[in-house]
């Protein structure tokens, strides 16, 4: 049952864990863009821009949304684009394995913080791999993979 004593962990989950999981997800995409020689813009949050460093931009509502955009890949193949699109979920999955492994090795103590980390990571993976269009020019990662495999679309999903 949810009680007032659960509010602190809810706030930590919303304002720390979810943004961290989002950053891990986007870092997976960015890693593969970088690996295949593309230029990337990585935006964390929504609303007015607070600051940026390099190609990373932080916005006022940092916990709300994030996205990446990339320009032409030097190694422009179907496989490279597939890895770019699946990279976010792959990084989330690897982070789950790391957290659970550290708990199993008694390096981290089992705690609701880590439970929520894994829970929200699975949530993030599910919706990234659910084939849907959030808007006409914003497919989920799996929908971008579908477009790539069926129609050969190798473009940035936010273009």
Image (spheres, rainbow, N blue to C red):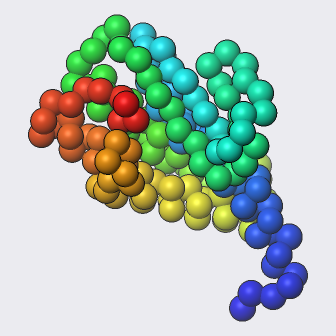
Give how far across and how far down residue 78 sits, in percent: 22, 25
Above or below, 131 relative to 5:
above
Q: Give the number of callouts.
A: 0
* Residue that protrudes farthest toward the bottom in the picture: 1
Residue 51 placement: quadrant: top right
Residue at left 25%, top 26%? 154
In this rendering, position of residue 47 left or right of residue 32: right
Give how far across and how far down residue 132 sits, in percent: 31, 56
Q: Which of 33 and 119 is in front in this view?
A: 33
In this rendering, position of residue 22 left or right of residue 140: right
Residue 121 placement: quadrant: bottom right
Q: Which quadrant would the N terminus be assigned to in this image?
A: bottom right
Would you say residue 159 is visible in this rendering?
A: yes
Would you say residue 103 is visible in this rendering?
A: no
Above or below, 62 relative to 17:
above
* Residue that protrudes farthest toward the front in the picture: 48
* Residue that protrudes farthest toward the left in the picture: 150
Residue at left 65%, top 38%? 44
Residue at left 51%, top 32%? 68
Q: Which of 33 and 139 is in front in this view?
A: 139
Give how far across and how far down residue 21 sits, in percent: 62, 48
Residue at left 81%, top 88%? 3
Q: Which quadrant would the C terminus be assigned to in this image?
A: top left
Give how far across and how far down residue 98 sits, in percent: 61, 45
């Amino acid at each position: 049952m949810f009680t007032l004593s659960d509010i602190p962990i809810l706030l930590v989950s919303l304002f720390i864990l979810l943004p961290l999981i989002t950053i891990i997800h986007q870092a997976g995409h960015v890693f593969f863009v970088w690996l295949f020689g593309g230029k990337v813009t990585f935006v964390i949050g929504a609303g007015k821009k607070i600051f940026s460093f390099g190609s990373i931009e932080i916005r006022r509502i940092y916990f709300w949304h994030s996205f990446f955009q990339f320009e032409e890949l030097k190694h422009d193949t179907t496989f490279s684009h597939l890895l770019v699109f699946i990279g976010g979920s792959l990084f989330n999955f690897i982070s789950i394995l790391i957290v659970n492994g550290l708990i199993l090795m008694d390096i981290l103590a089992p705690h609701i913080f880590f439970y929520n980390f894994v829970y929200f990571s699975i949530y993030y993976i599910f919706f990234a791999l659910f084939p849907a269009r959030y808007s006409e020019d914003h497919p989920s990662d799996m929908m971008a993979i579908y477009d790539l495999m069926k129609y050969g679309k190798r473009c940035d999903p936010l273009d």
